[in-house]
Image (tube, rainbow, N blue to C red):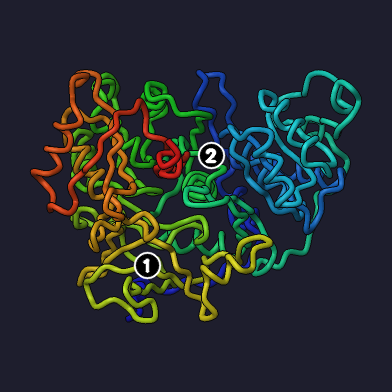
Amino acid sequence: MVFRSEYADVPVLSLPIHDVVLGRAAEFGETPALVDGSGGDGALSLSYAQLDALHRQVAAGLAGAGVGKGDVVALHSPNSVLFPVAFYAATRAGAAVTTVHPLATAEEFAKQLRDSAARWIVTVSPLLATAREAARLAGGIAEIFVCDRAPEGNEAGNEAGSGPGVRSLQEFLGTAEPVPDVAVDPATDLAALPYSSGTTGVPKGVMLTHASIATNLAQLEPLVPMGPGTRILAILPFFHAYGLTALMNAPLRLGATVVVQPRFEFDGFLAAIERHRITALYVAPPIVLALAKHPAVADHDLSSLEYIVCSAAPLDAALAEACSARLGLPPIRQAYGMTELSPATHLVPLAAVAPPPGTVGKLLPSTEMRIVSLDDPTKDAPPGAEGEIAIRGPQVMKGYLGRPEATAEMIGADGWLRTGDIGRVDEDGWLYVVDRVKELIKYKGYQVPPAELEALLLTHEGIADAAVIGVDGTDGTEIPKAFVVRQPHAAELSAEEVAAFVAARAAPYKKVRQVEFIDTVPRAVSGKILRRELRAR
C-alpha cells in the first residue's frame, strides 16, 4: 500500500535556494543570524541584513572572477560564520556547490574535484595547503579563494609559481562588479552536489536541485516551526546534507539565530549551550549517548534547551529516554532521511505530546511511502510487517552525477526511490527504522539487525560504545561480531561477559559469537557507523 502524509501538501518552491533562505532577510534586519560560538564576547557575528549584503558582494566578486551558471564551486571548510556566505554567494553567481569534508586528504579531495568538474575552490587558511595539492592533482582549477582571512605567501599560486592563484574573499567586499542576476531553473539546475557518505560503497555526487532543497524546507516547517528567538547550536557539519538543511538553510529561512562551532569537543559543546542559551539541538546518536552518560553534563546549566532532534543513524529508544530524562526535556524527536532525499522525509513533530518510543516520525507533507517486501521486491510488505522503505516526493534527488546506472538502480521509472533501509509502520502512521538492507546479518536463514544488538550492548554499564557486523562463520553462514569500547571503569570486562550479556537478553540466533575490544567505533561525521572499516580490520 502507499502511505501518504496526514499533513496538507505544500507547493513546490520554484525559486533559487538563496532567495528561498534569505528572502526575508530585510524583515529580520538586525536579528543575529550567525554567531561564532567558539569565541568570547568579541566573536564574529552577522545580522540578517549583514548576511544578505555580504553574500551579494561575494557573489559579485565570484561572478567577476568567472564563476557562472553551470559551474561547480568546491566549498572546503569546517563550520564557520562565513560558510553560508560562500554557499549562497556561489549559488547566486549561478554555480552549484560541492561540499567537501574538511578532513579529506588531498587525494580524496582531488577525486571529488575531478568527478564534480569543479573549477573553483573556497577554503580556509589552515586547509589551504591541502586545497592547493588537491588542485594540482586534479587539474583544471581556475582559482582558489580563502574565506577566513587573506592568504599568506605567493598569491599568484604555489611558491614555485605553478598552480591556480589564491585570493581572499575579503577582496570582494569593495568590488565594483554588479551583483549577478542569473536565470535559474529551480527544477533542473543544481544548487548542491554533496557526496554520499560511502559507508557501503564509492562516494557519489548527489544532484540536488534548487527546488528539491527549497521544497524540503517547506515540508519541514509545519512539523518543526522556528523563528526569531530560536537559538540553534550548529555542531554537525554544514557540508553534510543534514547540517546543511537543519542547521543552516532551515533556521536562516525563518529568522532563527545559528551559533556556529567549527568542531565538536564535548566540554566546549556544553559550554556553548550554557553561554549562548541554546534552545534547540540537532544531533546524531553519539552526542545523545554522551549527553545521557557523560559526567561533565552535570557541571553545566543546560536549562535553556527546549528540544533535541536526532537523526543520521539509528537511535535506541532506551538511550533517547535516558537522555531526555537526564536533561528534563520532552522526548527526543527523531527524524529520517538521506542525502538523496534533500534530505528529510520523516520527523517526530514538536507538537506531538507522547510520541511512541523509537519512532523516526511521520511523513512530511507531499511525501509518499511504500514498505517493499524483502522476499519479493515486486510486492509491498503486509501491513505492520518489515520491508524496505521506498519514498516518492519533490525532495527526491535528480540523480547521481555521471552515474545513470546507479541512479536507475535506486530510482524506478515510477519515481520511487529505494532507500536500502528496513522499516515498518504502525497503525497510527509512525515509522520505525530497523536497519539497512545491506547490513542485515544472515545467520542460518535468520535476519539479524545489527542496530538492535548495538542498542542492547549500550545498556551494559561497562560499555561506552559498540558496533556489530556480520562475519564469515565456520559453516558458511554469517555470525554477529561485536566491536566494543569499554567504559573507563570497566577495564576488566571480558569478551565472555559481553557474549553472555547478549545471550541472556536476545533470541538464540541473535547471539554475539565474536567480541573484539577497540578504542573507538569508526563513524562518519553524520554518526553512521563505518562498518566497512570494521570489516577491513
Which is more toward the observer, 139 or 278? 139
Residue 330's place in the image compared with 68, above or below, is above
- Quarter occupied by residue 123: top right
Q: Amino acid at mark 1?
A: Ile
Q: Is residue 265 left or right of residue 380?
A: right
The quadrant of the image that shows the N terminus is bottom left
The mark nearer the N terminus, 1 or 2, is 2
- The residue shown at (66%, 66%) is 186
- The residue shown at (45%, 39%) is 536
Q: Mark 2 = which residue? A: 31
> Mark 1 or 2, which is nearer the eye?
1
The quadrant of the image that shows the C terminus is top left
Q: Position of residue 343 (x, y in %)?
A: 48, 57
Q: Position of residue 390 (x, y in %)?
A: 41, 70
Please, which residue is most extreme toward the left here? 504
Which is more toward the observer, 438 or 103? 438
Label number found at residue 531: none
Residue 140's place in the image compared with 497, above or below, is below
Which is more toward the observer, 373 or 348? 373
Which is more toward the observer, 401 or 376? 376
For numbered disc 2, what is the local secondary structure? Answer: loop
Q: Mark 1 = which residue? A: 389
For numbered disc 1, what is the local secondary structure? Answer: strand
